[in-house]
Image (tube, grey):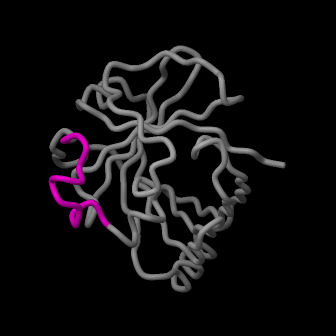
Amino acid sequence: MNQEIERKFLVTSHAYREQAFACSRIVQGYICRTMGRTVRVRIRGEKGFLTIKGASHDGGLSRYEWEKEISIEEALELMKLCENGVIDKHRYLVSSGNHTFEVDEFHGDNEGLIVAEVELNHTEESFERPSFLGKEVTGERRYYNSSLTLHPYNQWTSMTKEETPPQSYPQSCS
């Protein structure tokens, strides 16, 4: 079984931009997003992906994940089947110790939200924390991409925004 184990954090500064070794644009939609499972179509650069995720366990730390690369043409066709709400973001890859952090800078209805994730081999694995990591939000459903399509960040009130992420500015990566 393909088990994804990851921790998610809010980002407190733009330091990740200078530390990133790669950046790409991601657009994704959801064919299915129900409690306990999601089916996602993603376009990352010039590649397409179909991903199925199961229910979260361990307080949101782990869940089943299956992903298959598909052609860009297939991904574009499948995007037409997606439910309302699309995620548009730039993903920066940042090395920290033995791990790579994926920092997602959201656009559109989620503009201003920036989160970082690190994938682990087991739930107790330690990792080096980069300076830009803020509050941990692992397991908080509102930060799941599938939830952000239904309840975008720009609709949250200042009372529900735990920390104020750094303000975004135009992108330089493709």
Name the spot of residue 66 as percent of width and height, x first.
73, 56
Q: Residue at x 23, y 30 (%)?
A: 13
Which quadrant of the figure has residue 120?
A: top right
Q: Which residues are magenta?
A: 152-164
Name the spot of residue 137 as percent of width and height, x first.
42, 41
Above/below status of 150 relative to 90: below
Q: Residue at x 65, y 23 (%)?
A: 124
Could you tell me how many numbered marks the image carries?
0
Above/below status of 94 relative to 76: above
Most extreme residue toward the bottom, as rendered? 81
Closer to the camera, 83 or 74? Answer: 83
Q: Residue at x 37, y 62 (%)?
A: 88
Closer to the camera, 158 or 115? Answer: 158
168 vs 78, left or right, is left
Kindly report the secondary structure that dominates the magenta region of the rendered protein: loop
Closer to the camera, 172 or 87? Answer: 87
Specify whether residue 169 is painted magenta.
no
Closer to the camera, 174 or 12? Answer: 12
Which quadrant of the figure has residue 103?
A: top left
Which quadrant of the figure has residue 110?
A: bottom left
Name the spot of residue 173 as percent of width and height, x first.
32, 44
Most extreme residue toward the right, as rendered? 1
